[in-house]
Amino acid sequence: MEKKFYYAPVGDRLGFDSMDTHWEHAIPEYRNAPHVWNVGGQDNVAVYLLDTGDGLVLFDSGLSPETQYLVVDRIWRTGHDPREIKKIFITHWHGDHTANVRTLSELIGPEVEIWISREDEVEHKKHAEDKTPMYVTPYKVTDFYDNSEPIVMGKFEIHTRLCLGHTPGTTVFFFEDTDEETGKTYRVALHGGIGVGKQLLPKELKKNGLDPLMGWVYVKTCRELSEIPVDITLCSHLNQGNILPNIPKDRNDYSVFVADYLWRDLLLNRADAAEKMLLENEK
Ligand SMILES: [Zn+2]
């Protein structure tokens, strides 16, 4: 079988230039699982909206402050009211995932909960003044993930796992989503940050005051997580699953995204890449 979804390295279209000319990178909203839509509104970083039946959840917040209007617009277009978001789950502290947390929480109101891992809140605080390469907006975290307890909302049980590597507190999310029309249940997963690069080398980690073995922990965790069966993978960056060419004409038809090989392929691909880099570095 030919695989439609696979790890595709970042091409010209998916670099950070999309922050400067975001209108050239605008994409429509589309349904990714029975109760999940990508409302990121551009072709780089996804923002997932989950309708739990007991309030809306947003995973991450958008690429950059300039793209916030796209996120708000795409949420409305799915038939949901952005002011009904109860929780924002931050996958990791980087600016391209957290850029609109502050403005969205101002829009929603003070009752919105902002979640992050304890580990990444430390990093967020360390980098709070950063302006480059990514602008870090001043948002206030209200809750931390407890990876031993699922977060329950409506019929959804959202399980979190730590996958340190991309950042010390990158979080992975697992939940089951049932389509009431067909009765089918899908295992859905979102890995918050699988990008690996020089930041995982012991020398770089040490320089940043982090555990120099974090790169190896990342490799091990990716291999462990790859064993978990997943039907629908939500990609935090769209290139990570070759998503763009596969967005269907009928944007309500999430069935195209049912691909039980993608999660495993993606995580093993990243584990192999990180391992290769770490071994070459030891030579
Ligand atoms: Zn990142």
Image: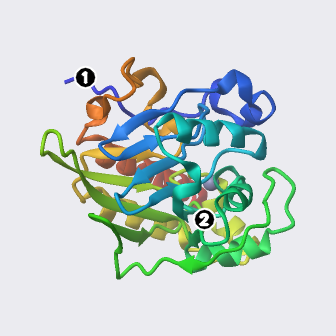
Question: Which of the 4 quarters of the picture holds residue 232?
Answer: top left
Q: Nearer the viewer, residue 171 or 3?
A: 171
Question: Which of the 4 quarters of the picture holds residue 126?
Answer: bottom right
Mark 1 Cα within 10 Å, few/some/many (few <14, many 20+)? few
**From the viewer's perspective, is 270 left or right of 262?**
right
The verdict on label 2 being within 8 Å of ligand 1 is yes
Determine the residue located farthest toward the top in the rendered image.
249
The verdict on label 1 being within 8 Å of ligand 1 is no
On the image, numbered disc 1 is attached to which residue?
A: 2
Question: Which of the 4 quarters of the picture holds residue 224?
Answer: bottom left
Residue 157: x percent and y percent?
30, 68
Q: Secondary structure at mark 1?
A: loop
Q: Secondary structure at mark 2?
A: loop
Amino acid at dot 1: Glu
**From the viewer's perspective, is 91 left or right of 98?**
left
Q: Quadrant of ligand 1?
A: bottom right
User: What residue is drawn where x is 69% and y is 34%?
Assistant: 15
Cα separation, mark 2 vs mark 1, equals: 33 Å
Q: Nearer the viewer, residue 33 or 281?
A: 33
On the image, numbered disc 2 is attached to which residue?
A: 167
Residue 192 in view (yes/no) = no
**From the viewer's perspective, is 160 left or right of 279?**
left
Residue 107: x percent and y percent?
69, 56
> N-terminal of the two: label 2 or label 1?
1
